[in-house]
Image (cartoon, grey):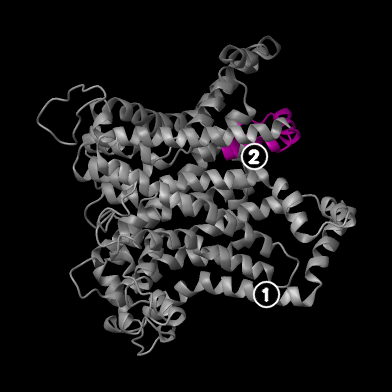
């Protein structure tokens, strides 16, 4: 595979021998700054992450670094906190990914209707994207305060029977984070799905309504298959973002990942070990595990997309 | 083409034509709009009332009415406590350099991959695509180590340099340059223009939409960064806005008015830019999905 790719440009060499030399030089001049930065800030740290994960490297330590094999990985796999963190990512994703994708699709269908003011609604639904997460988290900390507006709302509809102390209650803290994440992020997915909706050929709907298909039938038989790729994209990107959850559980509870580690995610766990406790080796092992999970998710996505284009 | 859009119009009209359905749709859409907007209204209202009033009146609809009104008192407190001019300038410097240098570096890279012929080109495209998969979080720990080794903690460069070159943006430029017709470049080449001149005078002006998309996405990502600056900065000197909010995390009573003023100030620049370039934002985000 590699030989075929490399040989493709070289077959054209004889045809345009003289400009080739300068063109190659120009190409590498154009590429050089980016390539240097990618090597230094992506490739090198990535290789280092794998190496550190096999050593007892610490940020600052008088002791020499020692190769420890898979000790860090075994240590993580035996650590209940690691599993708790992974579980928290999982339960966050299990709700947010389907809910946010469905919500985004609903919003996209709404603002795709031919009605007055659709651009205004689209703008409003998209606005929270521009609110940086640190600000969004802060606003919602106040809203989720035990005496805050969210509880004011629930008091109204449950007559005071439901008023948890959201961010200090291990049962409810993750739900507060879920709400903020969807509020802030769903506009992004909406816009991607909206673009896909507008690419579905109109004739298909016309033909379907001649055949007597109702709105729901048209939605399931034309709309959903028509935006399949965008849905897969949104689904996997949201899953990967769910794996990366860090800002909200760091900023919202009284202590990062709290209360009682109920919002401790893999990233919170990694930063706690790699930075907080300066155990670079252990943190790197989590980074590598995290990368493998993201890689698997990406490969699953590509697999689904390939199947589509093969049909 | 015309037939196609006519069909679309009729397909949608048949849905919107029913007045009952139209009213239901509007009501639901307005409720949803309220869900997205109320935290922002609440933020602004809370930033204009005394600190101790924010929580006191937060459980009723009064929370949306800024009384008792204290004017911009919280804002001046927040600006002073958080050393806002400094923190704001830090954010502008960091995001500004990431985005502007990134536009140059990534577009040159993408152009070379799309248009110039050199050995190893296809392999390099493959490498760029593979690098897109690596999430920054997986690199944070070793990057912190590298930064500490060269004494870069608490500097601007450690917050800027790792984010200039982006495999995703290189790929976005690459696919954009592939999509524009070659003829103009060939004409310029016949006129004796050098590759650099062709790029700066012919190709780059044509690629304005791609530059706009990458600038918007880059700005959106870098302005809100929290994880990395919270790891590599300690003092207020080089801290960006999102991390700067930490100065308010003190012992109770928490000055909620000041905090809300700070979040208003942190949110406002991006919000204003968004409202001005609303169309470009939406198109930029939409095109980030198409390539996935």
Q: Secondary structure at mark 2?
A: helix
Residue B177 sits inside the magenta stretch: yes
- For label 1, the crowd category at 10 Å Cα-Cα, with few meaning under 14, some 14 to 19 and many 20 or more, is some
Q: Nearer the viewer, mark 1 or mark 2?
A: 1
Residue B267 pos. (x, y %): 43, 66
Along the viewing direction, whichever of B41 and B144 lies nearer the viewer: B41
Disc 1 chain ID: B
Give the residue drawn at x 75%, y 49%: A221
Give the residue drawn at x 51%, y 48%: A238
Is B172 placed above or below B269 here?
A: above
Along the viewing direction, whichever of A141 and A34 lies nearer the viewer: A141
Q: Earlier in the sequence, mark 1 or mark 2?
A: 1
Q: Is residue B49 left or right of residue A55?
A: right
Residue A242 pos. (x, y %): 44, 48
What residue is disc 1 on? B26
Give the residue drawn at x 59%, y 61%: B277
Where are the magenta residues, as a range? B171-197
Q: Where residue A19 is drawn, which disc sits there?
A: none
Q: Where residue B176 is drawn, which disc sits there?
A: 2
Residue A310 pos. (x, y %): 71, 30
- For label 2, the crowd category at 10 Å Cα-Cα, with few meaning under 14, some 14 to 19 and many 20 or more, is some
């Amino acid at each position: 595979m590699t030989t075929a790719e490399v040989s493709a440009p070289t077959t054209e060499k004889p045809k345009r021998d003289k400009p080739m030399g300068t063109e190659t030089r120009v190409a590498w001049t154009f590429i050089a700054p980016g390539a240097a930065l990618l090597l230094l800030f992506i490739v090198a740290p990535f290789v280092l992450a794998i190496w550190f994960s096999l050593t007892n490297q610490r940020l600052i330590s008088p002791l020499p670094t020692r190769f420890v094999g898979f000790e860090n990985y075994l240590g993580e796999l035996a650590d209940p906190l690691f599993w708790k963190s992974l579980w928290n990512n999982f339960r966050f994703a299990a709700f947010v990914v389907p809910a946010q994708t469905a919500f985004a699709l609903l919003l996209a269908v709404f603002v795709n209707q031919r009605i007055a003011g659709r651009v205004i609604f689209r703008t409003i639904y998209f606005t929270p994207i521009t609110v940086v997460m640190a600000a969004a988290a802060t606003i919602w900390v106040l809203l989720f305060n035990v005496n805050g507006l969210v509880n004011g709302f629930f008091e109204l509809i449950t007559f005071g029977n439901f008023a948890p102390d959201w961010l200090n209650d291990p049962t409810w803290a993750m739900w507060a984070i879920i709400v903020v994440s969807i509020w802030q992020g769903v506009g992004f997915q909406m816009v991607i799905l909206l673009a896909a909706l507008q690419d579905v050929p109109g004739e298909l709907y016309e033909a379907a309504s001649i055949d007597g298909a109702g709105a729901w039938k048209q939605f399931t038989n034309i709309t959903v298959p028509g935006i399949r790729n965008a849905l897969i994209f949104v689904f996997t990107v949201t899953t990967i973002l769910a794996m990366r959850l860090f800002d909200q559980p760091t900023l919202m509870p009284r202590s990062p990942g709290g209360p009682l580690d109920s919002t401790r995610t893999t990233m919170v766990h990694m930063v706690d070990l790699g930075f907080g406790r300066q155990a670079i080796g252990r943190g790197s092992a989590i980074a590598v595990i995290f990368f493998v999970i993201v890689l698997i998710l990406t490969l699953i996505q590509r697999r689904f997309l390939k199947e589509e284009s093969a049909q | 083409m015309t037939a196609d859009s006519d069909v679309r119009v009729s397909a949608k009209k048949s849905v919107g034509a029913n007045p009952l359905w139209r009213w239901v749709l509007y009501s639901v859409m307005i409720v949803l709009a309220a869900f997205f907007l109320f935290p922002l209204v609440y933020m602004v209202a809370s930033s204009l009332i005394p600190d101790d009033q924010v929580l006191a009146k937060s459980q009723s609809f009064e929370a949306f009415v800024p009384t008792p009104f204290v004017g911009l008192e919280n804002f001046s407190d927040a600006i002073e406590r958080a050393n806002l001019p400094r923190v704001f300038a830090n954010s502008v410097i960091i995001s500004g350099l990431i985005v502007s240098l990134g536009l140059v570096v990534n577009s040159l890279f993408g152009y070379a991959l799309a248009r110039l012929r050199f050995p190893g080109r296809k392999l390099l495209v493959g490498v760029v695509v593979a690098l897109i998969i690596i999430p920054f979080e997986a690199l944070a720990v070793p990057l912190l180590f590298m930064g500490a080794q060269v004494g870069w903690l608490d500097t601007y460069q450690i917050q800027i340099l790792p984010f200039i070159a982006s495999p995703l943006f290189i790929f976005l430029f690459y696919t954009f340059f592939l999509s524009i017709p070659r003829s103009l470049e060939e004409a310029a080449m016949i006129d004796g223009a050098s590759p650099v001149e062709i790029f700066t005078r012919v190709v780059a002006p044509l690629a304005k939409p791609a530059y706009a998309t990458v600038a918007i996405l880059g700005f959106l990502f870098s302005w809100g960064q929290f994880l990395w600056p919270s790891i590599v900065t300690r003092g207020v000197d080089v801290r960006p806005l999102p991390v700067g909010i930490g100065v308010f995390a003190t012992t109770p009573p928490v000055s909620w008015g000041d905090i809300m003023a700070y979040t208003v100030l942190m949110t406002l620049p991006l919000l204003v830019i968004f409202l001005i370039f609303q169309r470009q934002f939406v198109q930029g985000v939409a095109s980030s999905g198409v390539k996935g």
